[in-house]
Image (cartoon, helix red, strand yellow):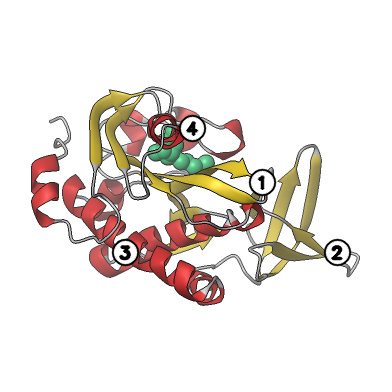
Amino acid sequence: MPPQAFEINRLRETIQTRRFGKEFVFLRETTSTNDVARELASKGAPEGVVVIAEMQTAGRGRLQRRWFSPRGGLYFSIVLRPGIKARDAAKLAFVASLAVAEVLKERYGLPVEVKWPNDVLVNAKKICGVLVETEARGEEIGYAIIGIGVNVNIDVEKELPEELRASTTSIMNELGLEVRLDEIFKYILEKLEDLYEEFLRSGFSRILERWKRYAGFLGKTVEVSSGSERLQGLALDIDHEGALIVRLSDGGTRRFLVGEISLRTKPRN
Ligand code: BTN
């Protein structure tokens, strides 16, 4: 059976947001919802416009990776105009991954973890990714696009390429049943709006404290890759700017800013 379609009309009737989703652009298929949202933002689209697609043909992830986007997944991007400094933009990814983590735990009972800087995992496998892209305007950002992809009703074994199967999961694979796309999207958008408003009102520290509750990699040995450099160490903390603090084997500490870095948790040996 093909996965259920996204019921956009039901969503329009039930969504309870203040600033997000006043306008939805709903597409059966597109290259990347981030591309569409950027195009709209560059033409002046206001904060809160949301682009959703049932499928993406050129979904993108961080570090120039592909994001496989078959039907059954949730793929959307939001236009934001937060009026923050460019160097604070990475904090938006924490807001977004926290929103998804809390929804997966509170609404679907999944044992979620977050992985720095912005992945959501279930049973050590990736279930959601977040891609934040910004347009700089001097020191501040003109707009930011938060793109979120969640593996919802996807059978990972059948639908994703072999090299991703061992490290990826979906809600359907975890729960053994399909969930409604419009419903999970509504929960995530409402939660994201609450957390985003808290971030604008009160700053990053409370968001980060909440995010760290799910950060199972803290206190564990991790491997950090940045370009050709590969380092192992103990993940000590995430600081007030969202940087990862690692204690290296020589006893020194190093701080990694969100950027061209990927992180792997090392199995205990
Ligand atoms: C990552 O894990 O590297 C981030 C993945 C982000 C995927 C989402 S799906 C919706 C939006 N459109 C894209 O092309 N990418 C993001």
- Within 10 Å of disc 2 (Cα), the crowding (few <14, some 14-19, many 20+) is few
For the residues labelled 2 and 4, the Cα–Cα distance comes to: 34 Å
For the residues labelled 1 and 4, the Cα–Cα distance comes to: 26 Å
Q: What amino acid type should be assigned to the residue bearing mark 3? A: Lys
Q: Nearer the viewer, mark 3 or mark 2?
A: 3
For the residues labelled 1 and 3, the Cα–Cα distance comes to: 30 Å
Q: Nearer the viewer, mark 1 or mark 3?
A: 1
Q: What amino acid type should be assigned to the residue bearing mark 4? A: Arg
User: Is residue 207 visible from the viewing direction of this image?
Assistant: yes
User: Which quadrant holds the C terminus?
Assistant: bottom right
Q: Nearer the viewer, mark 2 or mark 1?
A: 1
Instruction: Classify mark 1: helix, strand or loop.
Output: loop
- Mark number, residue 138: 1
Q: Residue at image x 18%, y 48%?
A: 182
Q: Which residue is mark 2?
A: 249
Q: Residue at image x 37%, y 58%?
A: 100
Q: Which residue is mark 4?
A: 60
Instruction: Classify mark 4: helix, strand or loop.
Output: loop
Q: Earlier in the sequence, mark 3 or mark 4?
A: 4
Is 102 situated above or below 67?
below
Instruction: Classify mark 2: helix, strand or loop.
Output: loop
Q: What amino acid type should be assigned to the residue bearing mark 2? A: Ser
- Mark number, residue 24: none
Q: Nearer the viewer, mark 1 or mark 4?
A: 1
Q: Which residue is mark 3?
A: 191
